[in-house]
Image (cartoon, grey):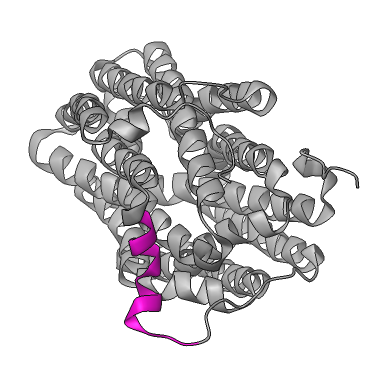
């Protein structure tokens, strides 16, 4: 009997899945640049940049018990298609709102909440679907390719977003809407995916199964919570419009370059990981890279020279990529399929907390103390988290191999 291929690209349904991810990630990056610049241009207040992150995070937090159960109980591919339809409509609403030449900003936050609800269902279903499309041996390669796709979009997407916004916000939102529609088409071409319904009834036990599993797996809990607090404190992305406009004196294209810089470092590391992976001492490498992320966040916070700022962001992206790779590989290989949707829903709330809630934290601190203080405090805090977590979770620190559990 032939051994299943460890190359994720030999699985055609996964290729269509990857195409959908690419379209979604490009659309998200373009919209992030457009929304950030538009909100700051209309308000000139970092407080509202924090609200942008909060509006996208709260739906995932409020729905965490529901979204994972839905991903485990219903057809994950259908869930992705429905969510993409909602996201396409939301992007179209941003376009329609911009065409009216607005003087108020509150409709943007309403639309972002709608996007947040769709993403709350999309993310755990998408994360749980990927392993269904691959053999167990191909999952690490699939994770690195998925991360590479996201990081490629992170490099090119913000630059494209900045260029498109330079033409007009309408053009940026129009392209994002088109990409989301293309993602929905890719999902259709994935075809039928075998998925056993492991959830026959709904109870408190089934709703909380994702939390219970994570709590029981100390290595998974440590990896997820480490990323949560490290990026929550790091959160420099939300303040890039402030840095681009007021500190580094760059325009929308400069903002796009800053947003792209972490992706450059990440894609370089992702390419290396897709070929060589991490053979040993995964835990120690993870903690060292989280600490490195904090060091270069601090450097970015103090920088007033755009080449140095870009260098710091490139290094941040590279270190963060290692954290993503280790965390996702450990979680996907250690999680049974019957609770994968619920575990991924919890993981996505942690990721959302570290990203969107981190943006909210950064915006609030910048509002009170200034952007530089907000970023520098976050970088120092991230280094402290790496040191503390290495002591709280010794099993994670001593984890060596990234391999499937028997």
- Looking at the rendered structure, the number of numbered marks drawn on it comes to 0
Q: Kindly indicate the quadrant of the structure image that contains residue 55.
A: bottom left
Percent coordinates x, y for residue 302 in the rendering: 23, 17
Residue 288 appearing in the image = yes
Q: Residue at x 66, y 38 (%)?
A: 145
Percent coordinates x, y for residue 213 in the rendering: 39, 59
Towards the viewer: 105 or 11: 11
Which residue appears farthest toward the front when viewing the image?
Answer: 406
Magenta stretch: give its range. 201-214
Percent coordinates x, y for residue 201 in the rendering: 47, 87
- As for residue 222 lying within the magenta part, the answer is no
Q: Is residue 76 left or right of residue 283?
A: right
32 up-or-down from 231: above or below: below
Q: Is residue 63 left or right of residue 381?
A: right
Which residue appears farthest toward the left when viewing the image?
Answer: 368
Which residue appears farthest toward the bottom when viewing the image?
Answer: 201
Q: Kindly indicate the quadrant of the structure image that contains residue 91.
A: bottom right
Q: Residue at x 48, y 63 (%)?
A: 119
* Dominant secondary structure, magenta: helix
- As for residue 204 lying within the magenta part, the answer is yes
Q: Residue at x 37, y 18 (%)?
A: 309
Residue 104 appearing in the image = no
168 up-or-down from 154: above or below: below
Towards the viewer: 307 or 268: 268
Towards the viewer: 381 or 28: 381
Q: Residue at x 54, y 68 (%)?
A: 338
214 up-or-down from 184: above or below: above
Q: Kindly indicate the quadrant of the structure image that contains residue 9.
A: top right
Percent coordinates x, y for residue 398 in the rendering: 37, 26
Towards the viewer: 137 or 173: 137
């Amino acid at each position: 009997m032939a051994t299943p291929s460890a190359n994720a690209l030999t699985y055609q349904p996964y290729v269509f899945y990857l195409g959908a991810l690419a379209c979604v990630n490009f659309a998200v990056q373009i919209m992030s640049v457009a929304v950030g610049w538009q909100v700051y241009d209309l308000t000139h207040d970092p407080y509202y940049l924090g609200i942008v992150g909060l509006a996208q995070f709260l739906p995932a937090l409020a729905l965490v018990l529901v979204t994972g159960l839905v991903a485990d109980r219903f057809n994950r591919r259908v869930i992705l298609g429905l969510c993409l339809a909602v996201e396409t409509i939301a992007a179209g609403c941003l376009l329609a709102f911009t065409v009216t030449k607005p003087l108020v900003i509150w409709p943007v936050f309403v639309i972002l909440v709608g996007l947040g609800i769709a993403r709350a269902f999309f993310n755990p279903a998408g994360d749980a679907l990927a392993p269904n499309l691959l053999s167990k041996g191909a999952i690490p390669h699939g994770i690195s390719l998925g991360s590479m796709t996201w990081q490629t979009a992170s490099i090119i997407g913000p630059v494209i977003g900045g260029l498109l916004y330079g033409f007009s916000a309408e053009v940026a939102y129009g392209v994002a809407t088109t990409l989301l529609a293309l993602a929905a088409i890719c999902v259709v071409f994935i075809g039928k995916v075998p998925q056993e319904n492991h959830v026959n009834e709904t109870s408190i036990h089934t709703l909380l199964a994702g939390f219970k599993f994570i709590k029981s797996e100390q290595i998974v809990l440590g990896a997820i919570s480490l990323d949560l607090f490290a990026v929550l404190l790091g959160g420099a992305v939300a303040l890039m419009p402030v840095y681009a406009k007021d500190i580094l004196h760059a325009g929308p294209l400069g903002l796009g370059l800053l947003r792209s810089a972490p992706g450059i470092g990440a894609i370089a590391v992702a390419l290396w990981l897709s070929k060589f992976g991490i053979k040993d001492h995964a835990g120690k490498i993870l903690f060292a890279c989280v600490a490195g992320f904090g060091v270069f966040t601090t450097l970015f916070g103090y920088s007033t020279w755009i080449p140095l700022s870009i260098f710091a962001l490139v290094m941040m992206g590279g270190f963060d990529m290692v954290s993503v790779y280790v965390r996702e590989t450990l979680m996907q290989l250690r999680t049974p399929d019957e609770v994968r949707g619920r575990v991924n829903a919890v993981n996505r709330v942690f990721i959302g907390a570290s990203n969107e809630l981190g943006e909210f934290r950064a915006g609030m601190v910048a509002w009170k103390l200034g952007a530089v203080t907000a970023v520098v405090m976050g970088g120092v805090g991230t280094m402290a988290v790496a040191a503390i977590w290495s002591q709280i979770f010794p099993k994670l620190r001593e984890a060596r191999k990234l391999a499937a559990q028997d």
